[in-house]
Amino acid sequence: MAPVKTVCVYCGSGFGEDPAFRQAAEVLGAALAQAGIGLVYGGGNVGLMGTVARAVLDGGGHVTGIIPDFLKSRERMLDDIQETIVVGDMHTRKRLMFDRSDAFVALPGGIGTLEELVEQLTWAQLGQHRKPILLVSIADFWTPLLTLFDHMRGHGFIRAGLDLNYLVAPDAASVVPMLSEALARTKPAPEAEEFIVDKF
C-alpha cells in the first residue's frame, strides 16, 4: 500500500489524571509533523485532542478537524488549523474521518474515544477496511480493554476468521514506525472502502 499520508487520532477531550497522557499527545503530534503525516481529528481545542493538534501545528504539519455543529461550543474549535469541516451529525463526522485517513490511532480517552475505536475495529472485523488500527497504551491504559477482548475470545464471541486486527504501542514515539511497517505489509482490499456506514 501507499505510505501513510494521514492518520486519524481518537483521544479524550479532557487530559486525564496522568501527566503522561498529555506528554504522549505532544510526542505523537510532533512525530506526525516530522514525518509529514497529516492529522485528522475531532476538531476541538480542549484536552488531549487539542494538545495533539497544536503539536502537529507547532511542528509545521497539516491538521484537518471534523466537528459536528452541536459540539462547536462545547469542544471549542481550534481556529489555527488549516482545514475545519463542520458537519450535521456524528455519523457524518465519523464517515469523513474514515475517508480522510490511512490509519487510526487511539490515545487515552473516554466513552467517545472508545466508541470510535471499537467502531473501526468492527468495520475491520467485518472486512470493510484494512487500514491499521493502533492503540497507544500509555501507562497500560488500554490493558483492561485488551483483557476484555481476550475474555470475549475465551467465551467464543470473537471467533476464528472474525478476529480483531490491531496494534498496541507502549509509547507515542513508536506509532509512526509501527504504522509505516503495518501499511507496507498490508494488501489493498478490493472495494473494501466502498461501504455505507448506515448499514451497521
Image: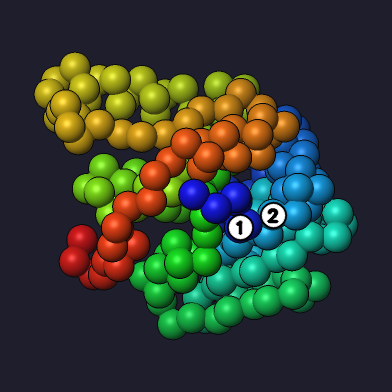
The part of the image, by quadrant, that contains residue 38 is: bottom right
> Which residue lies under the disc numbered 1?
6
Tag 1 secondary structure: strand
Crowding at mark 2 (Cα within 10 Å: few <14, some 14-19, many 20+)? many
Left or right: 48 in relation to 89: right
Would residue 56 be visible to someone looking at this image? Answer: yes
Q: Report if the CB atoms under discs 1 and 2 are less than 8 Å apart.
A: yes
Tell me the element at label 2. loop
Within 10 Å of disc 1 (Cα), the crowding (few <14, some 14-19, many 20+) is many
Q: Position of residue 179 (x, y in %)?
A: 57, 39
Q: Which residue is mark 2?
A: 37
* Amino acid, disc 1: Thr
Q: Position of residue 160 (x, y in %)?
A: 16, 26
Judging depth in this view, the residue of 72 and 66 nearest the camera is: 66
Q: Quadrant of residue 139?
A: top right
* Nearer-N-terminus badge (1/2): 1
Q: In the figure, 39 relative to 25: above or below? A: below
